Amino acid sequence: MIEHTRIYLIRHGQVDGFENFPIYGHTDIELTEIGLLQMEKAAERLRLVDVSAVYSSDLKRSLAGAKIISRYHDSPLFSRQELREMRFGEWEGLTLEQIRKRFPEELKKRAKNVVHYSPPGDSESIAQLAHRVMGILKEILSKHSNSKIVIVAHGGVNRVILCHALGLDLGNLFRIQQDYGCLNIIDYFPDHTLVRLMNG
């Protein structure tokens, strides 16, 4: 069998206020009871996997899930700020509807250059998010060669990793669905990458 590193990439569970489609970004929000159950289900799916390490964003909604998954594994848990969701500046905590009403001109700018656009305030573009995320992913793959690794992160972070794995331009980011608590499986071989499961 060809040696490779397998990443079990998970999105955090359902969050408080989910029904209003909030843009939380770096806002530290808790999981709902359903969100915790979703993480329990993810943990059960991976219970028999020989996991070498679990990585998580340092935000509560991801870290809570990573801790649940870690219960089944005698392996270290690493909390990393680099795995945080995109920073949305003045859009943090707003719903999609509120953003449409308050920032119509900004949304027009975003539509013209979705990859390099940054919302008003202290924020990031998708390109900056990708630079941050791919940096930590490269570190994880290098550190845990030929191992099985769990990463619990966010919708935007996961989409960046999946775009890279599929060879897609970042402009296709929002063509990839990432449900709360979903599982993606990616195998990294020396000369290619194979996405075995997406949004499972």
Image: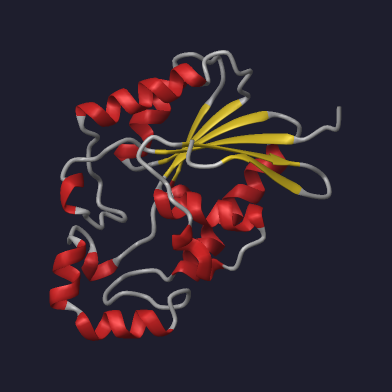
When asked about the image quadrant of residue 60, the answer is top left
Task: Give the mark count.
Answer: 0
Vertical order, 98 against 13 (above or below): below
- Left or right: 45, with 122 as reference point: right
Residue 73 locus on image (x, y percent): 53, 15
Residue 192 locus on image (x, y percent): 78, 49
Q: Nearer the viewer, residue 62 or 101?
A: 101
- Left or right: 124, with 26 as reference point: right
Vertical order, 188 against 78 (above or below): below
Q: Nearer the viewer, residue 144 or 18?
A: 18
Q: Nearer the viewer, residue 174 or 77?
A: 174
- Left or right: 118, with 10 as reference point: left
Residue at position x 31%, y 54% from top?
Answer: 26
When asked about the image quadrant of residue 22, the answer is bottom left
Residue at position x 42%, y 47% from top?
Answer: 178
Residue 122 locus on image (x, y percent): 30, 71
Residue 69 locus on image (x, y percent): 44, 22
Q: Nearer the viewer, residue 43 or 178?
A: 178
Vertical order, 53 against 10 (above or below): above
Position of the N terminus by quadrant? top right
